Amino acid sequence: MNEVELADHSFDLSEFHADELRDAVRAIEVPEPDEMSDSSSSVGEQFPLIELSGLSGQRAACMRWSHPSRVRAVGDLGDYAFAWFGGVDVHLDGNVGDGACEGMRRGVVRITGNAGCGLGAAMTGGTLAVYGSAGPRVGAAMRGGSIFVRGDVGDDTGAGAVAGTIVVGGDAGANLGDGLNNVTVFLRGSAESLAPGVIEAPLRKREEVRLGLLLMSASIRGKAADFRRIIPEARWNAEEAGAGEVRPNWR
């Protein structure tokens, strides 16, 4: 998203209830998307750019937006910002509270500040990048998509996650990966503790290549080789046994 691009529509959050704003956005005419990408904002440049102002910690901002659109905003938002988001591209220059991007389904969301508890919980798709730090339970119960946090994350990151990728550029809190299933956590710093049954595994070449591409897509600087791979021990044993691709019933 080009920050000097003129917005097609502007809304002051202080003047709208969350449901009213969602209805106003739905009324904007947009071309029918043939295919939407989870990782490339350039695909969505044909969709309208919406600029939000009047941010003052509102809760549930842009919650359940599914209308194809791009969003640009400066300021801090409260809990559940962009929850169940299904738009195209978001750039928020600010912080968010708890539950940001919970249930996110598609698109790209970039947050330059910090996030609270439950970032990306239960998300099923899309790319979520936070350039500050995040609280506990990042990616808890996630079912797909990719989460990037350039700073630190709190306790119980990845708890109960069954699919997707979590990338942490800083340190992690305690109990990292509790109940982790077919999910990979890439960690550049150190973890206070790993959950039982979760280990630090060597970064295979294919994983290094994949991580490098993911870092590029999230506009995060760093070498893939600087990260370590955190996975369930059972998954590592299956890999070492020469099972090739991990079978769905490995656990």
Image: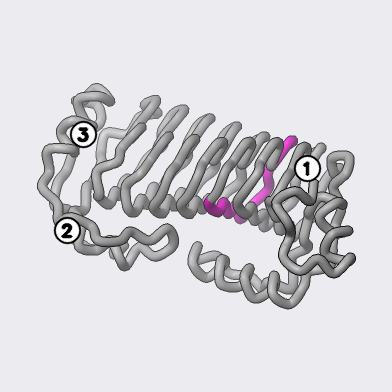
Determine the main secondary structure of the stretch shown in magenta.
Answer: loop
Q: Quadrant of residue 178?
A: top right
Q: Which residue is mark 2?
A: 6
In three-dimensional space, the C-alpha distance between marks 3 and 2, rounded to whole angstroms, equals 16 Å
Task: Please give the range of residues in magenta.
Answer: 145-157
Judge whether 44 appears above or below 121 on screen.
below
Helix, strand or loop status at disc 3 = strand
Quarter containing the N terminus: bottom left
Q: Amino acid at mark 2?
A: Leu
Do callouts 1 and 2 mark residues in contact (Cβ within 8 Å)?
A: no
In three-dimensional space, the C-alpha distance between marks 3 and 1, rounded to whole angstroms, equals 39 Å
Q: Which residue is mark 1?
A: 176
* Residue closest to the eye, 245 or 39: 245
Q: Earlier in the sequence, mark 3 or mark 2?
A: 2
Q: Which residue is mark 3?
A: 12
Q: Amino acid at mark 1?
A: Leu
Helix, strand or loop status at disc 2 = loop
**Residue 154: in sight, yes or no?**
no
- Circle 2 packing at 10 Å, graded few (<14), some (14-19), many (20+), is few
Do callouts 3 and 1 mark residues in contact (Cβ within 8 Å)?
A: no
Judge whether 242 appears above or below 230 on screen.
below
- Residue 148 inside the magenta-drawn segment: yes
Q: Quadrant of residue 139?
A: top right
Helix, strand or loop status at disc 1 = loop
What residue appears at the point 76 percent right and 69 percent down from the top-left corner?
244
